[in-house]
Amino acid sequence: MSGRARLALCAAAATLMTCCALLPLVAEPIWLFQLVPLLAVQTGVGAAARRVPLGRPLTVAAQALVTLVLLTLVFARQHAIAGLVPGPDTFRYFAELLRQGADDVSQYAIPAPVTDGIKLMLIGGALLIGLLVDVLAVTLRSAAPAGLPLLALYSVAAGLSDGGAEWLWFLVAAAGYLMLLLAEGRERLAQWGRVFGGVPRAPGALEAGAVAPVRTGRRIGAVALGVALVVPLALPAMHGGLLDAVGTGVGAGNGHGTISTVNPLVSLRDNLNTNDDRLVLSVRTSTDDISDLYLRIVSLDDFDGTTWTPAQRHVVGVPDKLPTPMGLGADIRRGEVRTTVTAADTYAQNWLPMPYPPSDVKVSGRWRYEPVGMTLLGDHGQTTRGETYQVTSLDVRPTAEQLASAPQPPAALRGEYTKVPSSLPKVVARTAREITAGANSHYEEAVKLQDYFAVTGGFQYDTSVKVGRGPEAIANFLKRKEGFCVHFSFAMAAMARTLGIPARVAVGFAPGTPQADGTIAVNQKDAHAWPELYFEGVGWTRFEPTPTRGTTPSYTQSDTPGTSLPDEALPSKGASSAPSAAASPSESCAGELRRLQGCGSPSAAAAPHHDHDGTDGWWWLLVVPGALLVLAVPLSPLLWRRRVRALRLGGHARTAQGAAAHSLAAWQELTDSAWDHGIPLDESLTPRKAAARIVRLGQLDPAAGAAVHRVADGVEQVLYAPRPRPAAGAAEDVHRVIGALRATVSARTRLRALLLPRSSVRVLWAVSARWSALRARAAAARPTLRRPSRQQG
């Protein structure tokens, strides 16, 4: 490895080691491992550009261009041309991600979740620092100033971090910078030779002054790089953060009288099987009918074929008045319910259990609002332990007819909430189609699915059954027909998605038990999961497929004997004939909340944002040439080399001058091809000696060697013979030699000769020569002003 390549590697390692100081700021260290190959590609492009060699500006431009393409490939592939070439949509998407990242930084406590916006800020910032360090230390050969961007990166991390391991990250960053300085010292020493005198050594022995820094630099670099890659896996501070809170719910006791906040789905079985059915919440409500008083904790939007998880959403401050829920139209009857909830001292939950949909929440402490799911979550360790809060919620009472006649939801929402992974067993969709055969609407399909699980399908409720893990879990559940609420809600939501019905899973508590004092006791065994399906004009609507659990919604209950479907012409039970007093979505949604994805249908998080101002056609006129230019830059050496070879070995004038020019061009192509394949130029040699050198270093066979000497003889004829004889077949001889050279070198050398041929540097030489000639002509054309003579006659 050359000295400059080693210096570039040390610059990349120093950047990576300094980036370790950012690890305590986020919950997961995975972004650092994603950064490693990107930084390696950026460094490799710089090393290749300097090896050609390209000029310094072109080297930096090539690295910057490759960095942009890498960021596009990782973060904005769907917004790029052909998935790789950045266009106007790519830059708009980057701007949106950076804005989201800035919002996330201001909203989340340390350690923050690695959202897409934060990840772009981390990886993009690290690549920018890496580019600056590489330019200063390697391209400009000045490693000392390269410490400034490293210091800036470390200062940002140290200023934001509130942990106790700053000294460790300082040592790692300092070791990386020291390694960079030592590598530069060795590279300079290799250029200038021994600086200090000493005892003579045997030929080829390294000077003592060089051995110590080199070995020390190697050891420090190896140890520091190992620390940078291993330490993130072992530090306990990197496993917390909001992501753990997002996946939290009710859980079993931890031995200290506290119901721990762990994943709601993992612990539901433990809650339902426990013998210690402790009180979780005490509820007072203004409604006389508590059958629909489900206390919802969180909605699970993302489905990977195995489980459902909460989507990462933006959170904002809790508004004074919550907006109308997404998709709820003004013509849907609704009432208002006031509920007071008191959490037990043994119940510490990061999410606030509330009736859905809430319209107003009064709670003390540090809480944040997630607009899409209409949920509240604690900030900086805030939990429900001992909290008393008031919730005003809407009692939405749609009719079966309104649900059956619901129009199609927005395409963006349908695309987000009907996605199923390819790993989902085919039996799930096939069974859904069989169950819902004959249905005339998505509403009828949903009711048929609910009745299949709860009534007609022969399913049994059992909290101890095991259906396995992975994509086959739902298939096993459909086959065994035994499970508890998680299995029923998962299966119905997945099957609804295969039918094109937007669906998600909600986790919380089923209606509790009324007490003599007028309160409702919600116990640990009331933990529950249920599916929510979306109907345009009504919004997210609860269904209850789990037998013997919860209550069947009135809008899905049969009003006609012999049918499982309700009479669509009749209103739901308990529906009020009074007009709704609630404002429409457009009236109840403030502008700021609309910007922060907290408004009505369609969801701001799901709906795409398109700004059609009539300039799309003009954009494409700029994008297409730009894309072609971006593709042409890395291929330009290859294209130029192919063109030059075709011109040199092509046809020529059938005159003595034409034959002489063709012989000289063939010889230049032969020597350039040998240069591309690793045989450097030596213009001090005669053509005959140069030919012998190419045959020897290229290890050519006798036939190829004879071809080299024939081309060299033709050049000698042109240069030295008084009447040169044209050499026939020079182009064929050159092609024969090129094929022989390719056969004797490694695959790496062949690839470099194809994509980054060394002889392409002649373009820069030609540009430099023309620039010098232009300056010389300009200087010659400038008039010379003569000073008047001071001599007196």
Image: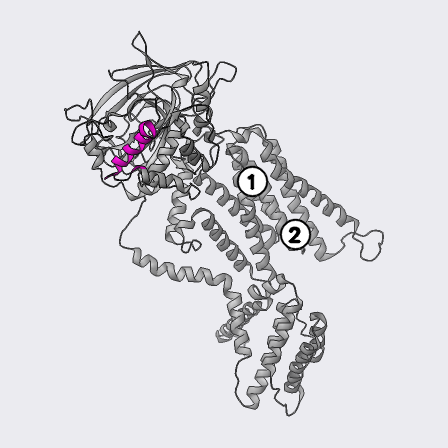
State how far apart marks 2 and 1 are (Cα).
Answer: 20 Å
Alpha-carbon neighbours of circle 2 within 10 Å: few (<14), some, or many (≥20)? some
> Residue extending furthest top?
516
> Residue extending furthest bottom?
723
Residue 750 within the segment the image draws in magenta: no
Instruction: Give the residue type that dot 2 points to.
Output: Arg
Q: Quadrant of the N terminus?
A: bottom right
Instruction: Give the residue type that dot 1 points to.
Output: Cys
Alpha-carbon neighbours of circle 1 within 10 Å: few (<14), some, or many (≥20)? many
Q: Nearer the viewer, residue 766 or 735?
A: 735
Please say if 421 is above or below 162: below
Please say if 740 is above or below 63: below
How many numbered marks have been drawn onto this rendered protein structure? 2
* Color encoding of the figure: one colour
What segment is highlighted magenta in the picture?
A: 435-456
Q: Is residue 198 visible?
A: yes
Q: Which residue corresponds to the image point at 29% horizontal and 33% vertical from the top-left?
A: 448
The residue that disc 1 covers is: 19
In the rendered structure, find residue 6 and report the number of the disc placed on it: 2
Q: Quadrant of the C terminus?
A: bottom right
Q: Nearer the viewer, residue 568 or 711?
A: 568
Place of residue 602 in the rendered image (x, y in percent of width and height, measured from the top left): 28, 38
Majority secondary structure of the magenta segment? Answer: helix
